[in-house]
Image (spheres, rainbow, N blue to C red):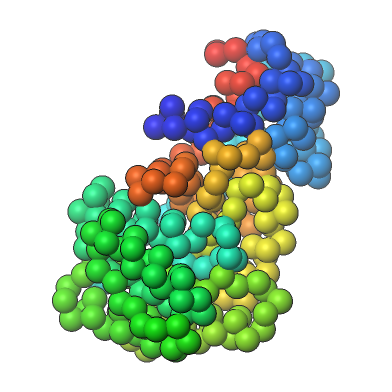
Amino acid sequence: MFGFFKKVLSKTTESIQEVAPQKSKKISKDLLEEILLEADVSYDLVEEIIYYMPPSEMVERKDVRRVLLAYFIDVKEEEQADVKPFVELIFGINGAGKTTTIAKLAYFYRLTKKQSVILAASDTFRAAAIEQLKRWAGIVKVHIIATQQGHDPSAVAFDAITSAKAKGFDRVIIDTAGRLHTQKNLSSELKKIERICNKAMEGAPHRKILILDGTQGNAAISQAKAFNEIIGMDALIITKLDGTAKGGALFSIAKELQKPILYIGTGEGQADLIEFEKEEFVDSLLDSFFLAD
């Protein structure tokens, strides 16, 4: 797993090494500030991190590690022992990798957790989205409930949940149209899907997950806040982090949203999704400019 995080952060660490080419046991606060800004940590958060450092001018790895770890919210264990199916509602804007991430999640649940999964193709806004999810369902070998473009997306979610209940499936993952928070009609649609899920099964959806494009860095924060105001969210998945030098933005995202990061996308394949481990993420970053303790 540790190797995966080094791979994911490779572009970020390359960028850091431009301002800190030599690793050392201690670095100055000024250099730490440069490093964090280079990694796309927001300026206000960099100032806060520096504030929490010891009073001496030089800082050690353990000092920085302690502060950086504090920004991540731990994932609560899913209270799903008696919840079957466990329903997850997935949302995010077009281009964030939402549909691909849903397929990766389904594959992860089926392969790693040995759970049965039904996908709900509730992105009926685009015909291509339905076909894409159908193809992925075939690739990762899970069931799917789909209809035609323009049909009621909440009805698809309802059918998927009722089918999963009847057939004893463990999970339902609901895709939704890529929404910009300025599109009020689509926002209303998302709220309707949430209501209909609860009609199909009281308490559903059990987890609402926002997909964020890691290449957007800190620019993704305002987008995430808007979604949180519309429907609320329980957790995040960050995609495309392997293709950007903005890995440090995760600290700003975690601080601003106060939501746990569940998974990180590491590529385009069905298995390219890893569980987020804050210790390994922080250590992979620190390894680029600190010598090992």
Which residue appears farthest toward the left when viewing the image?
167
- Residue 65 in the image, given as x and y percentages of width and height: 60, 29
- Residue 205 in the image, given as x and y percentages of width and height: 41, 75
238 sits to left or right of 132 = right
Q: Residue at x 63, y 17 (%)?
A: 290
- Residue 131 in the image, given as x and y percentages of width and height: 39, 70
Q: Quadrant of residue 164?
A: bottom left
How many numbered badges does the structure rendering display?
A: 0
Q: Residue at x 51, y 57 (%)?
A: 97
Q: Quadrant of residue 219?
A: bottom right
Is the residue 32 above or below the residue 112 in the image?
A: above
Q: Residue at x 43, y 77 (%)?
A: 122
Quadrant of the drawing holding the N terminus = top left
68 sits to left or right of 4 = right
154 or 258, which is in the foreground?
A: 154
- Residue 70 in the image, given as x and y percentages of width and height: 60, 40
**Visible residue check, residue 276:** no
40 sits to left or right of 131 = right
Quadrant of the drawing holding the C terminus = top right
**Visible residue check, residue 126:** yes
Q: Residue at x 27, y 61 (%)?
A: 138
